[in-house]
Image (tube, grey):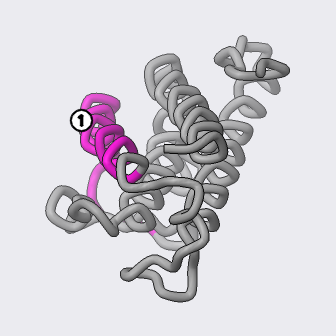
Amino acid sequence: MHAITEKLQLHLSLSFQMLENVIESCPDTFWVAQEENESIWKRVLHTLESIDHWMVDFSDYHFKSLFDTYTAEMDQTCSSPPLSKKELLSYKDLIKPKIDRFFSEMDDVRLTEHSSVHPATTFLDIILSQIRHIQMNVGYFNQILNSSDLKSPTWLGYNES
């Protein structure tokens, strides 16, 4: 691995850890909302599925085998009951080593190569888009907590080198 790849892995790992903090610290009152797509559980599912989908070059896609009656799309709903924190923590535990496996195949040169599964996209695009996607969803959660005068999880890696 090289310097750029290591920095990318660091920032994706910090973002992922912040998502973990969201799952663990989310009050039950926000976990399930009346509107499914406003629920924290749905945003967590959506975010984890995105990583699962895009980082599939070197490992399996887990979503369909685990959640075949669910949709991770934020503009669609399903008739299945909300997923619990325990269920999404288990899914997260499958995704975390998937990220590690993805980075074990990366170096600074390979970052600019195209994914064999997503040929229009480079590995660098995949990594950067997942960092942005995780942070956007963590920000959504923080906004909900802050607007309810609750403390949001601590941001990690802020102004650190």
Position of residue 44 measured from the top left corner of the image (x, y, whole percent): 48, 44
Residue under label 1, please give it: 90
Q: Does residue 72 belong to the magenta stretch?
A: no
**Vertical side of 14 occupied by 38: above or below:** below
Q: Nearer the viewer, residue 112 or 25?
A: 112
Task: For label 1, count other residues whose C-alpha is less than 10 Å away and answer few (under 14), some (14-19) or many (20+).
Answer: few
Outermost residue on the left side: it is 65
* Residue located at (28% from left, 62% from top): 58
Residue sitting at x 25%, y 64%: 61
Stretch of the chain drawn in magenta: 77-102
Label 1 sits on what residue type? Answer: Ser
Instruction: Please identify the quarter of the rendering in which residue 153 is found.
Output: top right
113 vs 53, nearest the viewer: 113
Q: Above or below — where is 122 with respect to 104?
A: below
Q: Main secondary structure of the magenta part?
A: helix
Q: Residue at x 50, y 53 (%)?
A: 107
Q: Position of residue 135 (x, y in %)?
A: 68, 42
Residue 99 sits inside the magenta stretch: yes
